[in-house]
Image (spheres, rainbow, N blue to C red):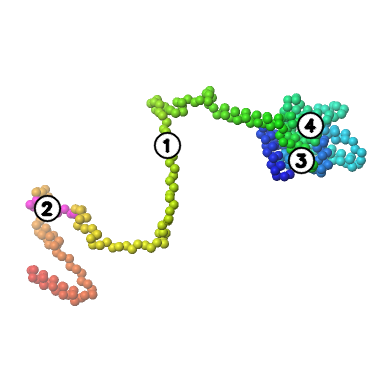
Amino acid sequence: MRGKRSKQYRKLMHQYALAFGHREPYQVLLDAGIIRAAANFKMRLGAMLANTLHGEIKPLISQCCIRHLYDYETATPEQEREKQEWISVAKQAERRRCGHHELEKPLGAMECVMSMVDPKGSGGNKHRYVVATQDEGLRRALRGVVGVPVVYVKRSVMVLEPMGAVTARVKEGGEKGKLRAGLTSLRPAGTGMKRKREDEEEGEGENGKRIKPETPQPVQPKLRKAKGPKGPNPLSAKKKSKTLPSSQDKPDDNKLSTRKPATKPHLSPSSPTADTATAIPAETTAEDENQRKRKRRRRPREGNSEETQEGAEAVAVAGAVAV
């Protein structure tokens, strides 16, 4: 089977399943004509039906149709052998009672199959049969019944007939009804198409006052960066040389040091708060001042030993003069 035809048949059976409830395994009702045609073209009837309908099948045959195969007259041994092959194929299908077994002669395929597909004449396929037949009159009658897929063999090719006009009309009406039902189910119960303005535009606050909903602010679109020439790679660029600050740019330490000394000055006896302060002996204060005024002696350098001796002699002379 070609891909295009296979796709059409799959879509057609999907429509039958949605609109009329056909499901796998499909109940395929056979007649004597299609069994003989499949044997003449050396076709495997069950496999071809499954490929055409794109699913599992359940072959069925009526009592009248299998009696037609038994009553077929043969004149040669080859025809008799073919007849036995037809009967063996028919026996693999499930026999379905049609109610005509009490008659002396079986009914024709058209009358028997139509009585099984539409027993009450209501124009509907009650049991969801798929009919496989070679009778043109039967196929013409089945086009007037709603929801009946029809299969036949034409030049060693199994064909699935397109949907009939009556079936297509009923399918479209069902789809429109589902659409209307979906729209009506979305409406609130007990109201028409209009809605209350208060429920839509206003609400109630905590104190029972009506509050208007806030107007939605327009969303500002994101600004895109303007494309332009890019700068140099900072990793490959030459680093700038650091310039030493000049003497004028250096900050004055005296100006910046606004912090007061942590140590408090000693209170003198002449100060107004001398009565409350503790008395400090004069001898200890004089010694402390002499120690504070005494200069630090620099440690002599190791390299210049002569200069160090001269400096030490000058310091000794200065001390003797002061005494």
> Element at badge 2?
loop
> Element at badge 3?
strand
Residue located at (87% from left, 29% from top): 105
Q: Amino acid at mark 3?
A: Met
User: Is 177 placed left or right of 273 in the picture?
Assistant: right
Q: Nearer the viewer, mark 2 or mark 1?
A: 1
Instruction: Tell me residue 302's x, y (percent).
Output: 23, 73
Q: Is residue 63 visible?
A: no
Q: What secondary structure characterizes most of the magenta part?
A: loop
Q: CA distance from mark 2 to mark 4?
A: 136 Å
- The circle on residue 267 is 2
- The circle on residue 138 is 4
Instruction: Tell me residue 110's x, y (percent).
Output: 80, 30
- Residue annotated with mark 1: 217
Q: Amino acid at mark 4?
A: Leu
Whichever of labels 1 and 3 marks the residue nearer the N terminus, that label is 3
- Quarter occupied by the N terminus: top right
Whichever of labels 1 and 4 marks the residue nearer the N terminus, that label is 4
Residues marked 1 and 4 touching at CB (< 8 Å): no
Residue 260 falls within the magenta-colored stretch: no
Q: CA distance from mark 1 to mark 3?
A: 65 Å
Looking at the image, the residue that sits furthest to the top is 190
Which region of the structure is painted magenta?
A: 261-271
Q: CA distance from mark 1 to mark 4?
A: 69 Å
Whichever of labels 3 and 2 marks the residue nearer the N terminus, that label is 3
> Element at badge 4?
helix
Residue located at (62% from left, 30% from top): 176
Residue located at (23% from left, 58% from top): 251
Q: Amino acid at mark 2?
A: Leu
Whichever of labels 2 and 1 marks the residue nearer the N terminus, that label is 1
Residues marked 2 and 4 touching at CB (< 8 Å): no
